Amino acid sequence: MDKRSLKRLLVLLIVHLFLLGAGCNRQEKDTQASPLKTESETGQQTLVLPTHGAYTGAFVDFGPGESQVTFDALKDFEELSGKALAVVAFGNFWGDQNFPEKSVHIIRSYGAVPLLYWSPWDKPYVERRGPDRFNLLNILSGQCDSYIDAWAKAARAYGQPLLVTWGLEMNGTWFPWSGTFYGGETIVDYQGTTPLYAGPETFKKAYRYVIDRVRAQGANNILWGFHANNYSSPIASWNSMAQYYPGDDYVDWLGLSVYGKMVRTEGWADFIDMLHRPYLEISQLHPQKPIFLAEWGVGEFPPGDKAEFIAKAFTHIPQKYPRIRLAVYWHERWENPDGGYSNLRIHSSLQSLKAYRRGVADSYWLARPQFYEQSGQ
């Protein structure tokens, strides 16, 4: 037996032995859906979001760089979780200087829609290093135009619906496009009596610049996500989500990263505490645009109850947060500089795996994307 077959067998054995009798997984299709305004190059497909229910999604531990998508990894996660994925997320960093054609085709062949975290980040991909050659000022001066244009042409050639976030979690301090690196709270202008701050204003200009160039190449198959961290760091009025919002014309959906405890030095946090206030805050940016959990997850840190965190996410989103139309779980394990591990994988414990499988099995969580089929012009 080769390694691939052995790996697949082990996954099946884990699920069978530990979750025998957990019940059948219902994957009912929602019959009501609303269109998002993006089409393939031929005009044949339009991605729709359900008016009731939410899509399942995940980042599936694709290795260093977050970009090594494999079909086997997707099928293994499906077997582990008990439900297929409607959206598959992965990293696409500017330092790689490519449009991830292979990865999006793998995801398409699996039956999901790709979600690209398109990040202006150079190698090595280490957080808290500060701006690099893809810094916002270089972008605005046109130094990255050839790459942006080539990426956009490849995205257009792909022709199928894509979800893309550019410059995610800009209201934090860990990525090089953070507003803290571009003047932060320095007031540069006023909109009426409202001050405008250097950091967020620079980010907004770069965001619009990039999206304008992509659209100019005809890549109209992309749905653009404004993807913020749930709580700003630092917590200050100048660094709020609203300060970074680039405008309705540049945003198709509103995204949040919502994590519980990630490293052992952090305190334990309840899922509702991590989502409720940020959900209300991002909802104020637009009254109708769909909201995605563009990333969510929690580490295994007893006595903190990871299973309860996961269970609350699956039960409370339908009850209290009706604008959420997609939840992308971050299924990864990594070693930290202190030698400890952050294990966000759904099977970090038997209890966590049971909670995930039980939660996602509900028919509210939809396993495949839906499309409107249209004839070409």
Image (tube, rainbow, N blue to C red):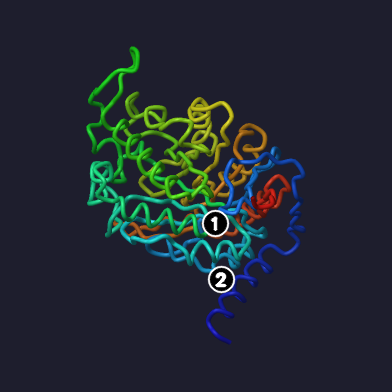
| Residue bearing mark 1 | 159
Which of the pair 119/1 is nearer the observer? 119
**48 to the left or right of 300:** right
**273 to the left or right of 133:** right
Picture residue at 52% right of the left edge, 45% below the top: 223
Q: For the residues marked 1 and 2, what is the alpha-carbon distance in whole angstroms?
A: 24 Å
Q: Give residue 171's position: percent from left, percent from top.
A: 36, 36
Picture residue at 23% right of the left edge, 25% below the top: 186
| Amino acid type of the residue that numbered disc 1 sits on in the rendered structure | Gly
**358 to the left or right of 283:** right
Q: Is residue 104 above or below residue 10?
A: above
| Residue bearing mark 2 | 72
Q: Give residue 216's position: percent from left, percent from top.
A: 42, 45
- Callout 2: helix, strand or loop? helix
Which of the pair 213/236 is nearer the observer? 213
Picture residue at 26% right of the left edge, 27% below the top: 185
Q: Is residue 335 above or below residue 188?
A: below
Which of the pair 22/192 is nearer the observer? 192
| Amino acid type of the residue that numbered disc 2 sits on in the rendered structure | Asp
**116 to the left or right of 376:** left
- Callout 1: helix, strand or loop? loop
